[in-house]
């Protein structure tokens, strides 16, 4: 590609609304431009990267035996009503009416549509297993789109859906998809981890996420120091502490805490470690048949964080998790948040105690009187200990749930997610097959997503320096930048550049030839570094006099003079080796 | 591809809601499935064709120097308000509100978005010309989607937009795009014609459509019998008849036509040829500053058809064309449609006479009294002849507007459309550059569309027989069908098929190997014919005993026995030659 025929849209300044480095660099390198909140245009440079990622994903999905299909962006409401998600799915599902005022949505995912297709086309176990994928535009109306294409509203996704006659068959395809995903991220050249994950609103039984490790990641991933165990903190089990609860000490006592509302303030005031306190979080219970919801008090150690995903999965707790309104807390506890505790609460309120809070002795908690706390509280002695559950996020140095080593936590960017859906959708939508015995049964399903556009941003988060992007070779928009010095003055430079450009292009190498006659060398070097081109060849009269050009690898500091005759073979070696 | 791993979803019956042959065959061959009105899923077979068309389009656009970008489906209302189309564009523009109740639309086209991008990125004539394209999902909320993917609501389109410092530069890129489109349709293997076209709601000065000729086409294309002239009938000029108007004969007279309302009924009753009558069509005039609209009477020969596109372009006529309400006609003419005519109409009504109607003598028209017509009416003698315009569609045997030969009319399916937009969008949206003299001026624009998904249907309209589709080689989903006889019984058949499959695949030939062990030969032959696979190889024990397999070309009736050793080289020759 000649730069004179290519939109190079680099920016010197970092746009002020770009927070994470990938967003900043995608804008600065001229890869994308914001159209509106969460909506991005892909300029030619960015699209070249996106298409390379897409091609790798397609090749590996094909190699794994998945069949490509294409389903519409706009989906009829009827199918979502059939699955129950028209009501369940929140505001991210953008609902629209067509000119005949029929209801549709912009597809955030395609379980309903593919299940609708397959229930018509497949009716025998003999036609299974089958796995269908598409690489297609999705829309999720995020409340707060952010980080550029990392969390956009419209984005490019590869989604696949597999259908099976048995759970064994699902497991086998699930394993193949797990491997295909590893192949994809290996080929792209990312430092990633498959981790155990929650199934979320998609539903189903087992699930893995694929995370690119990066400090800017929005997810916390828990790793074992001693094993392969890795799980999203959302899911990672916090084991019950080993050993017995210590014996109770001094008698429970009230203490005035008129100005202390947070755990840290109370602990400091009472000269306690926060781990000797408990906090009480009040959430809504599951609605009964009359639609009434009890309150549920969740009791955690003061230094621990509530895991909302774990909490909302508990029987008796509303899902999605909803914190109780303050007025109702005041009415039923007799105190405001900040002075709540498990002692003496009404029987109308269910109390659930976290495993770690359940082994405390002589702890401090709110007294259910505004501005008053209780000290030296003890389970069984002062207050019955009822239901105990795992309510909290794991922390660094917790014992690993795999039984080996302790937990370390790193940040990750989720770029892939695979699920064992089971029969959730096939049952709701009556997608059945005849089995070997001629009996109707629901198909078993899996689903497998990759955020194609998000991968581009994640790759940058992992591969950049103060000059700009450093692309992994497989997804670089161009592999080589060919840069002339004084093109408008030197015939020798022009001739050598044209010859090299022709030879490299003929060898199938993607070259950007910076052929604007009067472009300044410093600008071209800065631009091609910012754009992250892995290899750079500078052609100038001084070198040509000795028969050489200057080569530099974007990842290395050193330049080297290379004979004009050898540069093509050097680049070929670099690009293949 | 092995059929056992590929969704073959052929149907024996033609779905009752499919009218045109391409829609019927796409459903029957298992290429697409309807999701909702105007929304189609592409199954694996159909998507293979779509992707091949897409690849050809992309290659030719790249070769023509266009740069690929990707813009969102969802577009903010602000840009459409800036161009004025938020109000002008009708119900096809699906307007949506996001969760924050901001206005957006689903993009039916992307002039506004690309102009918004380019006005920020390009500010000097030195950066021009530049041409950007995308292959992207469009949505147009058609009132009456029909003919499957031919006129769907969601579809895949290639749209390109070029930017220039001058009209000369636009013309040059326009010519290049014209050639690129010819290359695309040549490579796909379609019988098509570039034709002069109306610019429609997109706006601009010059325009060509690319039509695939097929009886099911929705457009009429006028060709000259003697030259290269071809134009959409919407646009083709109807020349004024040569020669003088005949002299007036008998005196004008009233005649009662109590039960005759149509031209044909009146002509039959009066024993006249319809070409000796005129009809009067009443449409709304352009609104004046107060928003008032006069009536306009359009006078055409009884056997001629009104060309609405020509009419709505005339000064004084409302655009889009709107027929006058009957109550208002009754009030201002004193008669209902069916008895209207140009004689004695109020001066408040503008009368526009078609060129052919203007040379009639002794003609018949309505008398502006219900149930009464006038005979022997003559211009100038009985009624002043004022404004004369070209109001009608050309007809077969009309003189060609190019000056050579006469008009022939064929049906066409519009698969491409190129426009010289000029400065319509750049002026409305303030997309300017500095020219050579440092002066700000609006960029000159062109735009270039191809209906990628529609091409698939158009190719079938032109290439099918009673057995099914007959794909042009370049876009066939598979090039070769490999069909075993008694696969489950014969080891020799299995071995030879596996060897052939491996060899053909290694040669880069797309093969569908019908490897379901117990599939019936007749079904496999019918399915692969229906799916339109260009080449077929049948492998059976009887042939293998003599060392042969059976080869058949989908376009030919004859089969031939070919040596097992020669079949691969025969296929290579067929596919390359």
Image (spheres, coloured by chain):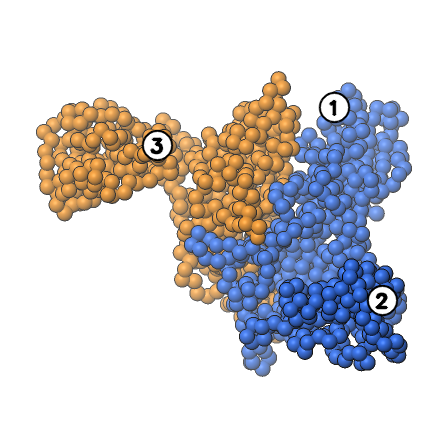
Chain colours: A blue, B orange
Residue at horizontal 72 percent and vertical 39 percent from the top: A16
Nearer to us: label 2 or label 3:
2
Horizontal relation, residue A533 to residue A136: left or right: right
Using the image, name the chain to which the residue with label 3 belongs.
B
Residue under label 3, please give it.
B290
Picture quadrant of residue A195: bottom right
Give the number of the disc on residue B350. none
Residue under label 2, please give it.
A275
Horizontal relation, residue A145 to residue B328: left or right: right
Discs 1, 3: same chain: no
Report helix, strand or loop for mark 2.
helix
Inspect this view and state whether residue A184 appears. Answer: no
Pointer 1 and pointer 3: residues touching (CB < 8 Å)? no
Picture quadrant of residue A522: top right
Residue at horizontal 77 percent and vertical 20 percent from the top: A489
- Dot 3 crowding, Cα within 10 Å, few <14, some 14–19, many 20+: few
Q: CA distance from mark 1 to mark 3?
A: 57 Å
Residue under label 1, please give it.
A518
Residue B400, given in percent of the width and then of the height, sits at 35, 31
Residue at horizontal 89 percent and vertical 38 percent from the top: A557
Report helix, strand or loop for mark 1.
loop
Q: CA distance from mark 1 to mark 2?
A: 67 Å
Pointer 2 and pointer 3: residues touching (CB < 8 Å)? no
Q: Quadrant of the N terminus of chain A?
A: top right
Using the image, name the chain to which the residue with label 2 belongs.
A
């Amino acid at each position: 590609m000649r730069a004179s025929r290519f939109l190079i849209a680099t920016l010197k300044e970092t746009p002020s609304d770009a927070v994470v480095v990938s967003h900043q660099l995608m804008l600065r390198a001229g890869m994308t431009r914001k159209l509106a909140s969460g909506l991005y245009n892909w300029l030619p440079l960015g699209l070249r990267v996106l298409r390379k990622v897409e091609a790798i994903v397609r090749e590996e999905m094909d190699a794994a035996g998945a069949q490509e299909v294409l389903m519409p962006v706009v989906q009829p409401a009827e199918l979502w009503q059939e699955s129950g998600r028209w009501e369940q799915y929140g505001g991210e599902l953008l609902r629209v009416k067509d000119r005949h005022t029929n209801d549709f949505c912009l597809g955030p995912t395609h379980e309903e549509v593919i299940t609708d297709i397959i229930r018509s086309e497949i009716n025998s176990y003999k036609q299974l297993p089958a796995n269908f994928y598409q690489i297609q535009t999705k829309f999720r109306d995020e409340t707060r789109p952010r980080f550029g294409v990392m969390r956009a509203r419209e984005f490019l996704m590869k989604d696949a859906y597999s259908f099976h006659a048995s759970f064994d068959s699902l497991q086998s395809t699930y394993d193949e998809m797990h491997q295909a995903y590893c192949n994809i991220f290996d080929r792209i050249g990312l430092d990633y981890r498959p981790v155990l994950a929650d199934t979320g609103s998609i539903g189903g039984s087992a699930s893995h996420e694929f995370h690119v490790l990066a400090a800017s990641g929005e997810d916390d991933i828990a790793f074992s120091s001693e094993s392969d165990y890795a799980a999203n903190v959302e899911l990672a089990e916090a084991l019950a502490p080993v050993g017995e609860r210590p014996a109770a000490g001094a008698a429970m006592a009230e203490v005035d805490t008129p100005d202390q509302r947070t755990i840290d303030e109370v602990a400091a005031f009472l000269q306690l470690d926060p781990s000797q306190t408990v906090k009480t979080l009040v959430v809504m219970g599951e609605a009964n048949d009359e639609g009434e919801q009890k309150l549920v008090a969740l009791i955690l150690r003061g230094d621990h964080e509530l895991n909302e995903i774990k909490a909302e999965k508990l029987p008796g707790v509303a899902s999605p998790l909803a914190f109780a309104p303050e007025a109702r807390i005041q009415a039923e506890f007799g105190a405001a948040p900040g002075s709540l505790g498990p002692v003496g609460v009404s029987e109308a309120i269910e109390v659930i105690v976290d495993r770690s809070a359940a082994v405390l002795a002589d702890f401090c908690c709110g007294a259910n009187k505004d501005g008053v706390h209780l000290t030296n509280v003890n389970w069984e002695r002062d207050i019955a200990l009822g239901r105990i559950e795992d309510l909290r996020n794991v922390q660094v140095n917790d014992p690993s749930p795999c039984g080996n080593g302790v937990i370390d936590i790193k940040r990750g960017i989720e770029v892939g997610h695979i699920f064992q859906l089971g029969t959730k959708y096939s049952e709701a939508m009556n997608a059945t097959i005849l089995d070997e015995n001629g009996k109707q049964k629901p198909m078993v399903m899996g689903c497998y997503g990759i955020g194609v556009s998000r991968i581009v941003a994640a790759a940058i988060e992992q591969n950049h320096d103060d000059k700009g992007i450093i692309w992994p070779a497989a997804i670089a928009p161009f592999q080589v930048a060919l840069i002339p010095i004084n093109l408008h003055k030197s015939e020798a430079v022009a001739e050598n550049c044209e010859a090299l450009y022709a030879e490299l292009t003929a060898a199938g190498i993607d070259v950007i030839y910076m052929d604007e006659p009067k472009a300044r060398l410093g600008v071209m070097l800065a631009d091609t570094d910012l754009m992250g081109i892995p290899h750079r060849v500078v052609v100038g009269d001084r070198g040509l006099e000795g028969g050489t050009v200057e080569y530099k690898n974007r990842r290395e500091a050193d330049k080297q003079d290379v004979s004009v005759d050898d540069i093509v073979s050097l680049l070929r070696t670099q690009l293949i080796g």
